[in-house]
Each structure stands twice: as structure tokens, then as C-alpha cells.
Image (spheres, coloured by chain):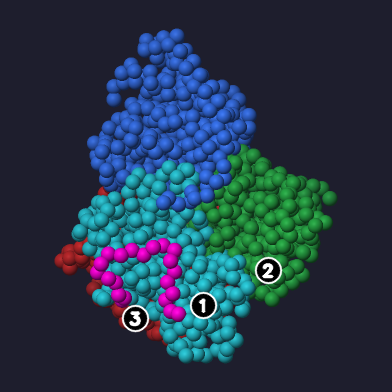
Chain colours: A blue, B red, C cyan, D green
Amino acid sequence: MRFKKKDLVRLYRNLVRARKFDQAAIRLLGEGKFTSFFHAAYGGEAPGVGGTTFLRQDDYIYAHHRGHGIPHAAGKGADLFSFMAEHCGKITGSCKGITGFHACDPEYGMLGAGGTIGSAFPVSVGWGLAAQKAGKGQVAVCFFGDSSAGRGTMHEGMNMAANWRLPVVWVCENNGMGQFVPIKDAYPLEDIASMAAAYGMPGVVVDGQDVVAVAEAVMAAVERARKGKGPSLVECKCLRFRPHVEGAPDWVHAEVRPAEEIERLKKRDPVTLYRKKLLKQGILTEKELEKIDGEIDAEVQEMERFCETGAYPDPSILQNALYAD
Amino acid sequence: MRFKKKDLVRLYRNLVRARKFDQAAIRLLGEGKFTSFFHAAYGGEAPGVGGTTFLRQDDYIYAHHRGHGIPHAAGKGADLFSFMAEHCGKITGSCKGITGFHACDPEYGMLGAGGTIGSAFPVSVGWGLAAQKAGKGQVAVCFFGDSSAGRGTMHEGMNMAANWRLPVVWVCENNGMGQFVPIKDAYPLEDIASMAAAYGMPGVVVDGQDVVAVAEAVMAAVERARKGKGPSLVECKCLRFRPHVEGAPDWVHAEVRPAEEIERLKKRDPVTLYRKKLLKQGILTEKELEKIDGEIDAEVQEMERFCETGAYPDPSILQNALYAD
Amino acid sequence: MREILYLQAINEALAEEMSRDETVFIIGESVQGSTFNTTVGLVQRFGPDRVMDAPISENGIAGAAVGAATAGYRPVADLMFGDFIYCCMDEVLLKAAQWHMLHAEKVNVPLVFKAAIGGYSGLCNEHSRCPEAVVLHHPGLKLVLPSDPYDAKGLLKTAIRDNNPVCYFYHKQLLPMTGEVPEEEYTIPFGVADVKREGTDVTVVATSFQVSLALGVAAEMEGKVSVEVIDPRTLEPLDLDTILESVRKTGRVIVLDEDTLRCGIGAEIGMQIMENAFDFLDAPVKRVGAANMPIPGGVLEKTCLPQPQDLANAITDLLGMDRFELAVQTAGVKLL
Amino acid sequence: MREILYLQAINEALAEEMSRDETVFIIGESVQGSTFNTTVGLVQRFGPDRVMDAPISENGIAGAAVGAATAGYRPVADLMFGDFIYCCMDEVLLKAAQWHMLHAEKVNVPLVFKAAIGGYSGLCNEHSRCPEAVVLHHPGLKLVLPSDPYDAKGLLKTAIRDNNPVCYFYHKQLLPMTGEVPEEEYTIPFGVADVKREGTDVTVVATSFQVSLALGVAAEMEGKVSVEVIDPRTLEPLDLDTILESVRKTGRVIVLDEDTLRCGIGAEIGMQIMENAFDFLDAPVKRVGAANMPIPGGVLEKTCLPQPQDLANAITDLLGMDRFELAVQTAGVKLL
Ligand SMILES: Cc1ncc(C[n+]2csc(CCOP(=O)(O)OP(=O)(O)O)c2C)c(N)n1
Ligand SMILES: Cc1ncc(C[n+]2csc(CCOP(=O)(O)OP(=O)(O)O)c2C)c(N)n1
Ligand SMILES: [Mg+2]
Ligand SMILES: [Mg+2]
């Protein structure tokens, strides 16, 4: 996919939206406004944004739990306000405050999310199956973490998708860690992408801090899938600037991750890198960038008002909610 | 491993034992003497026999369900009489007739078996862990079918073993079928061994109808494991002359497998092939072979008497059996 | 009326619903060549895209069904033996069961988990279980247990049309059972119990194969004890009213269940009866079920699974009568 | 006596048993850097071979524990959140629970499945569950539910020494609870209930965090109603005698359970009480537990999980008193 200027601008906007909504989430959680927990994307927003910005509205995505899917929803164009409101437990939330952290926006192909890591794989196979059966060229993009790949569901899902040549794209957000365990201590090889060969599907590694590289790789896999050529695996090497979950110690095994290491990682901030690139390539000027940033700041403020003013759900909404009619 | 003459003879003996006990099982089931079902090994005895004959007594094995572990128990030296008696539901059975088909012979490293396909993988990891911790050079050999490899437990098990460099050898008995489904319709590649690379472990393919080739490949992997170099995967391309389970139609998807195809497969009978080889290489004469065969026929007869005369277990054996003291 | 087999009734329901609705498809292991003959002939008629032979991947099959269901299809996920549900509990109990409510009713999960349950074949613990209690413990799944060909067909058609996830568990011992099934189309609503036999002395609540067992015992006791046999047919929704009505009449109840008692179906139905009809009870509700152990294979299986004599003893004990020996045998179909 | 935290009590039990017995090791995700601080400091003391950080592989972890246990080790498999047991049910319920008996007692499976259970943190369905009923339904697993630091330590030591598989479920809300724990070594036998508070009007049976809830309610009701609170501490084995003794005294029982009612702990204990003390009951056993739905997150969680007021209402209803408002609040520890 050759990106036009407006694509690159859209990518920037979505990346900054992901960043600023993620930062807002960190802040809101700190202020006690979230009803549950938050696993910040900070530093690792590019895979989610790059992997979704150019999808069709009717493509399915399974967002990764990192950032709770904010980067993915931002890229996909789903409703971020209701998603944040969900975290605040409000009736205006994407699940009416019932989950406290799940995205659900069927109009944008986000049909649900789960809390057991690795449950994404089989469900994504189902979306790929539906897409294949419907024959309208949709794809299902499944985002997952490096360490989620430890689950057997990954194998079952990837094998089924490959076996039936389903239009599924597997996007691994490899930030090198799974909670407190470095992936190098949980998987014997360097690249999660090495698993792709076991299913006869392409497996590529891209710089997950480079949102354009992610978008290119994922969209190449998406086009392949749309043509009926089956699934692919795109591994994005990315970073995590925050602890596994907000408020918890930032452990690596039993040691706290040193502040200097995080400072070092921050040199590869995906937003800064992309800003620099856009400036250097003359796509956007400093002023234009600031304008976008400002617009998003305003959006975030509006979102916070939206979350603030929303009411908490009344228990009655659960009354007849267990079953569909 | 270079095999001496006596090794090759032992291999022959075990192979013929596996064959004749398997045939006896088919017969006994047909006569209504088995209390449950039987998945005959017929045609695919070589992986189980070749993969176990040269193991140490204290090595652990998880037998594949095909042949219900008869080939593996035959090779390992475990008690085949009690194993057959188990199938007849007798108190003299390896599980006192409690299971009707599970092998259990702790003295020979057979610590148990399960009925859900794929549950072998994680348990074998545990045996590998125990072996590594004990530091006595034991290995755990896990036998499984091509289609069992579809289960996520395979991925979890292989990854854990590779990650911790456990002394585990994974032996795939690829007979091309999983119940009524050809593996080519359940896995996109030709070789299950292709999965090994995903865990950075060696994966080799051998002729699973050639018992010596199996033994060589497995023992090479075993030696590697004993030296602390971690797990390997050995795939044995083998055959199945009988239906998935005795008494059921021999379906391939929704079509019955043609008799001519089975006749064609029988040209590669592992026992006949090995006999020919031994004769040709002058290891054993026709007469010596017949002597062995005759001894095993006698053993089978004795086994049948053993099964016949054993009593059925009394319900009282279950009284305090739920827990260990 | 014509008579067909239980397994044919299942097969007919599948075929009819697949013809009626293009979004219905079957996914599972060896479903084209049908393990229990319930899907026989369907691939020839509907093609391999609608009768999908899957890899041995229970999580994958169940999860794919959840995905496809939320995306507008109506998968029938065939889990083969009911025991294999243990290999995909996350998908069944935490995804299929919960996604509709948790996602604020924005998605539906119209699917059927179809599985063959039950023992009496000597196949031991992992090919004999009845996972009803585990399912029932988790809100969000409907639970269907047909006890004869008529119910098998009518309930499966309803299950496939339901907009919610349904566990449809058919019993291996019932596969060869024959029974009247009309040629004309019909469905059976969920939540309507069937009084399989009327009686006045004692109420036996049972589902699936245990209904046959109870009817056999009731027939043997005829003249001595008048046994009412109630088959709820669906445990979720549960037709408690019909049960309570019977309890008010007989004052004595036995819940017969093939599974272990602890936290089982008998405990639940027993509690609901006590909660709602305590004053009508002449004696505590009795549970008859499996012994507290893994299901053994071989000849020991019968030590574990409920036998006709166990039910007869429970009935006579409850009525304060002397025990007497029954002639009824539990079936024992050999499975292949 | 010194006071320590519930999480410290767990930690001490692990450390002591690991020192005592070289075959004990911990295997789980992020156990070196401890998700709930129960394994803190252990890797420094016992090294990474005995405090093993595993890949995210629940089947692998549980199955490896089964394997290692049968081969002579005593693994403590840390499943982190109790909910994750749904990802390895085959290993827990069909392997660990069953292998000893099925293999004719030739192998033992001495292991502990350790997991943090429970809600009241707003973490929604997959981080809040109490899987006790599912475990109890499957014979072969012991089931331990400590409700305070003293029990947490003494029962865990017993669990590790037991030659059978034990589910040791500790409650997330109890982690910061302080309580007296002797410096000296002690263990608590399984199957011995603890009367956490004596009373005469009504018996409340509860485990784990619900014991705190019940004690809070009992204290608030003091002077109006005399509530006896019984904590079985282990549900398998279950000390039914202590419960029955209390029932004979009070004639009125409530089983309080954090989980959904259907086929739950309340149904089981309720049935056992009715089966064994029917004539002592002045009213049917009452169950108080979670509403019949997936556990919601956020503010709706409290609509689902049992609240002090729910118990108070049940007590007053049972005694035929007017309801009155309680001041007790359910704890709500934020989890990280
Ligand atoms: C089945 C299951 N096991 C464990 C967890 C706990 N858990 C949540 S996120 C996580 C780490 C995931 O690591 P990775 O996939 O690399 O994603 P990252 O958080 O690094 O983006 C763990 C262990 C879970 N939620 N579900
Ligand atoms: C979890 C589980 N799923 C399905 C089955 C049913 N089943 C038993 S054997 C088998 C086929 C196994 O195929 P393969 O692994 O290739 O072994 P083979 O029988 O060909 O030797 C199936 C589907 C089972 N026992 N357990
Ligand atoms: Mg990660
Ligand atoms: Mg095979």
C-alpha cells in the first residue's frame, strides 16, 4: 500500500489520539475515576494504530488488552468517548458500564473482548470464517501480545486459519514482556514471527515503533487475505514505558525495571519518531502538527466532560439482559 | 546409536510382540472380551516399538492411544499381560480393571494415561521437569498422533520444554489420519516436524514403517536430551491398516476407505519389512525368526489364559481409592 | 405415526434447519463421517463448507463458533464426546455464555454446542461424563437434554433457532432408541417439562437417559408404587411449576441424575423444591446419582453410575416400604 | 501474639514448606515478581528452579504440575486469578483429580493449585470468579478456602504436605487482612470447621471472604439477632457434623456464598443439611449468593455479588422479623 499524504496525516492523528487517550486513561485511573484497572499502551501505541487505520469499517478486529484497545479503536474509528466512559463505569460506556473495560462497537467490527489472555485467537478464527462465508472481502485482524503467544489457543487459532485459508491477520505486539516475565525467558527464539512457518503462512517482523512500517506490513497482509490467500503473521517489535498494570510495581522477574532503562526506551517514542519523520519529509509542518495535537487535546477534554457527566448505570439494565430475545 | 545384533533381535522381538498382542486385542474385542473400545495399532507398530526399546527403565513415556500403548509398553518392557487384562476389565489388569484401557506401570516409567487426546503434552513436560530436577539423566518420551498436534496443549508443552531445555522427546506417529479426517485437511503443511522450528528444536522425519530408522532417530534425540541439550521432535510417517476404532466404519471424511487402498498400504507392513531386512542382512535366519514368532505366539496364548482366569474386580476396591493416605 | 431412531431425529433436525437457514453450519471433528451417526449424509447434501471437519482443536472449534455467531452465523459446534468440553471451558463458559450480557446486548451469540454425553458403555471417565451441572452453574447458556426421538428433534430445531448459546446434550445410550416422530415440521418450546408418566405416590425428576431408567423402574413397580416421572427436557430454562405441581400431589420427590451429586442437578432441583414447596414435603428430597468418584470403566462402572435398583431402593426407602428386587437392566450399547 | 497479613501468612507457609521439603516448587506466571505478593522474596531465597516463571500456558502449567507430582515432586501451581482455571479444566478436573484412583492407586498426585479468587474489585467476569462449585462437583480434589491469616498459613502447610491434589483458593479481598499468627510452626487439619462466632438464632455457613462479610453483619445485628457463623475452612473434606450441630441448636440456616446459586455451594450444603437434619429445620435452608448473571464490573458488580444487606435481609426474613438497614460496607480493595 502506497500511502498518500492524507493517509499519513490520518495515521498521525490516530497515533496522537491513541497517545492522548491513553495518557488520559492513566490520569483518570490515578484520580480514582476508573472502576477497574488499566494496562497502559504508553510507548507501544503504534501497532494498534498502524494495524487498524486503513482497515475497512466492516473488517473485524480483536484488540489487544494493552491500552485496553484504545490504539486499535482509535485507528478503527470506533467511538473512543464511549470506550473511556466504559472505564469510568458510566451508562454512556460502550458496554453501558457493565464491564468497566471492554470495547464493543459492532458497527466498527469490534464485536467483543475477553479478559483471559489468548482467548482472542479462536474467536478471531470465527470472524475470519464469517468473513470467508460472507464473501464480501472482509478480514479479521487479531492483535495479541508476545507472551499471549504462549497459550495453546494461539496454535489452534493459527492452524485453523491457515488450514482453511481464512482472511485473518495476526498482529503480534511484541514489547518484550509478559507481565513481569521477559519474553526471552518464556519463548526460546528471538521472534514470535518464527511461529508462522509452522502454519505455512508468511511471518514478518517490523519496527513496531514505526507506525508507517506497521501499517505497511499489516495492510500487505490484509490485501493478501482479502484475495483469499489466507492468513499472515506480522510481528511488531515495540515498547512499554509503563508497568504491566497501572499502580503495580514495574517488575522484571523479581527486580524493578530501572528508571534509566525506561528513559533509554523513551528515546524511541513512536509519536516523537513519527513527528520527526513527517517534519523531515515535509508532510506536515510544526504548526500543522501542533494544530492536530491541539484538536486532540480539545477532544480529550470533551471526552473527560462526557465521562464526567454520564450517569452510572441503574441495576435495572441487567434485569433482562442475560438472554437475547 | 549403533545397534548390535542383539539390539536388532530385541527390536524384532518387541515389534512382533506389539503386532501379536495388537492382533490379539482385535480378536478379543471381536469376541466381546474387552470391556471398552480398542484403537488398533495394526500397521503402525514401529514408532512405539522403535521409540521405546532402547530407553532406560527409569525413563518416562506417555504412550499414544493408538494400539492403546501396546507397542510402547512392549518396547519399554512393561507388563503386557496386566495391560491386556486391563482391557478385559480384570482385577489382574494394570489399573485393576478400573479404567478398561489405561496402562500404568510406574516401575517402567509409565505413570499414567488419559483419554482426552493432547493431554499427553503438558503432563510430559512435568515428567521432563522431574527428570531435569532429579539430575539422573532420565528422559521423558511423549508419543502422539499427527492430528493430536492440532491441540493447543501441543504448543504449550513444546514451548515449555524448549524454553527450559527439558529432556523431552516428542515422537509423532503420523499415520496420515485423525479419526475420519486426513491430516492434510487439518494441517496446511506436509510434515508435523515443521512445527519444531517454531521452538528452536530439531525436527526430523523418518520412515515410521522402518523400526530401525525410528529407533535411531529417537535414540539420537534421547542422547541429546540426556546431555541437557533440550527437546527434539521426531516424526514417524506410518500407516494404519484398521479403522480408527475397531468395529466402526473406516471413513475418510464421509467415504469408506477402499479395501484396495488398505491392500496397497499393507505392502509396507513394518513387520514384513523388518523381517526381510534381517534376513537380507543375515542377522537372523528364517528359522530363528520363526522361533521368536513361535515364542511370542506362546506368550500370547499364555496372556489369553491370564486374562481369562483373572477375576473381575470387586466394587470394594474403590471404597477408599479416591485419595492417597 | 412413523417411528425413527433418536440419532435420526437429530439428523433430521440438523438437515431441516440447514435447509431453512443458510447461516446454519456444523463445525467439529469428524462430522462429515459422523462419530455417532447424527451428522451422516449432511456433507453430501450441504457441502464441506457447511459441514466442516475441523482439526482436533476444541478451543478453536468452540471459539470459532462464538466468533461466527457474533458475526451473524448460527454455528452448531459439535464437540463429539461431552467430556471434551473440559478442553474448551473458557470459550463455552466465559465467552459464549457471557458475551451477550456483558457487551450490553449489542451482540448475540446464537450457537449450539452439541455433544454426546453419558456412560453405561464402560468407556471410563473421559468418555462418559454428563457435564450438565457445570453448564448450569454458569448463567448464560440454555441447556437441553432430550430423552426420546420426538424431543430430540423438536428441541434441536428450537435450539438452532434460539438467539442464544445452547448446550444440546444427547445421550449415547439413546442413539438407537426408536420413537414416534411426525413427518410434519414441529418445534418444542424450551422450559416446558413433560410428564412422561403420571403417578401419585412419588415424583421422580430425571432427564436424558435417566428418564428411560426411571420409566423402566416405574413400570416394574406398577401396582406396588405409583411413580410419576417428570422430564424437564431443558434444565435452563427450568419448568419448576410442573415439578412443584407434582410435588404438591405426591409429597415425595427423588431427583435422579447420572452425574455425581455434589453441586449437581439433584442438589439444585432439590433446593428449589425445598425453597418453594417445603410445607408439601413429607420427607426430604432424595438424590440418586453417581457415586463420588471418577467414572470407572469396565465392570466397575455400574458401581458408580446409578442403576435401576438404586432408584427402586430410594423409592421404597422414601415410602418406608420394604425393598424389593427389580428385574430392569440398564442398557449397555457398545460404542464405536 | 504477633499480627501479620493474610498475604504474608501465605508467603510464610510457602517458604517454610520449601525449606522443609526440597521436592516442593512453585510454577506459574509472574511468580518471581508475584502478582498478589504471596510469592515475594521466594526466588531470592530458593532460586529460579524452585520458583519458576512460566510462559502464559495454563494447560502447560497445570499439566506439568500433574506430571511432576506423579514423578515424586510437590508442585504448587500458581494459576494467578482463579478464573484462569477455566483455561486448564482438563488438567485440573480430569487429570489431577482422577489419576490416583483410576490408576488403581499406583500413582499419587500431591500438588496444590493455588489461585486468587473473588470479586468486590470491579474487575468483571474473568477476574472475579470463585470456582469452588466446579471443583467440588468433581471428586478427587481437596478444596481449601482460608478466611483469615491464621487459617491461610496453617491450611496451606497442610495442603502442601497432603498426598493428594488440593485447590487452595485465597481471596483477593483478604490479602491485606491482619491477624494473629504464631511464630511457631503449626498446621491445621483438613475437614475441621471453625465456629467463627457463636450464636443461637440462626446459623450462617460461609467461607473465605464471605466469613468477613457474615461476621460484620452478625456484629451489626448484635443484640437483635444472635448469629452463629461457621466457616468449614475446607469444603472437601467437609465437616458436616459441626454444621449439623449448629443447625440442631438454631433450627435456621443460611448458606452464604459469593458465587451464583445454581448447582453451587449453597445448594450442596443446603441439601446435605436437609438430608441429615430435616426434622430440626424450622424453615427451609436459605441461600444467599450472586445473582444469576456473569459478574459485571464497575458499579454494577454490587448488583450481582452478595452484599451485607442481602444477608441481613435473609436473616430477618428467616426469623420473620422486620428488615432493618445495616451500616456495614463490603470491602473494596483496589487490585493492581
Ligand atoms: C489466561 C490468562 N492468563 C494470564 C492472564 C494475566 N495476564 C494478563 S496480561 C498478561 C501478560 C500478557 O503479556 P503480553 O501478551 O506480552 O501482552 P503485554 O501485556 O505485554 O502487552 C498476563 C499474564 C490473563 N489475563 N489470562
Ligand atoms: C480432546 C479430544 N478430542 C477428540 C478426541 C477423539 N479422538 C480420539 S483419537 C482421535 C484422532 C486422533 O488422531 P491422531 O492424533 O492422528 O492419532 P491416530 O488415532 O491417528 O493414531 C480423536 C479425534 C479425544 N479423545 N480427545
Ligand atoms: Mg508483551
Ligand atoms: Mg493419526
Is residue D210 found left or right of A47 in the rendered image?
A: right
- In space, the residues marked 2 and 3 are separated at their CA atoms by 54 Å
Q: Position of residue C47 (x, y in %)?
A: 21, 55
Crowding at mark 2 (Cα within 10 Å: few <14, some 14-19, many 20+): some
Instruction: Judge depth for marks 2 and 3 and give the one in front.
Output: 2
Q: Which mark is residue A189?
A: none
The image quarter containing residue D268 is bottom right
- Mark 2 — on which chain does it sit? D
Residue A201 visible, this orientation = no
Circle 2 — which element?
loop
Q: For the residues carrying marks 3 and 1, which lies nearer the camera in this image?
A: 1
Amino acid type at image mark 2: Ala
In the picture, the disc for residue D283 is 2
Q: Is residue B91 above or below residue A97?
A: below
Please, what is the three-letter code of the amino acid marked with disc 3?
A: Gly
Q: Which residue is mark 3?
A: B32
Residue ID at (68%, 74%): D277
- The magenta segment is C178-198
Kindly tell me whether mark 1's CB lies below 8 Å from ligand 2.
no
Tell me the tag on residue C203.
Answer: 1
User: Residue type at mark 1?
Assistant: Thr
Q: Is residue C188 magenta?
A: yes
What separation in Å lies between label 3 and label 1 (alpha carbons)?
Answer: 38 Å
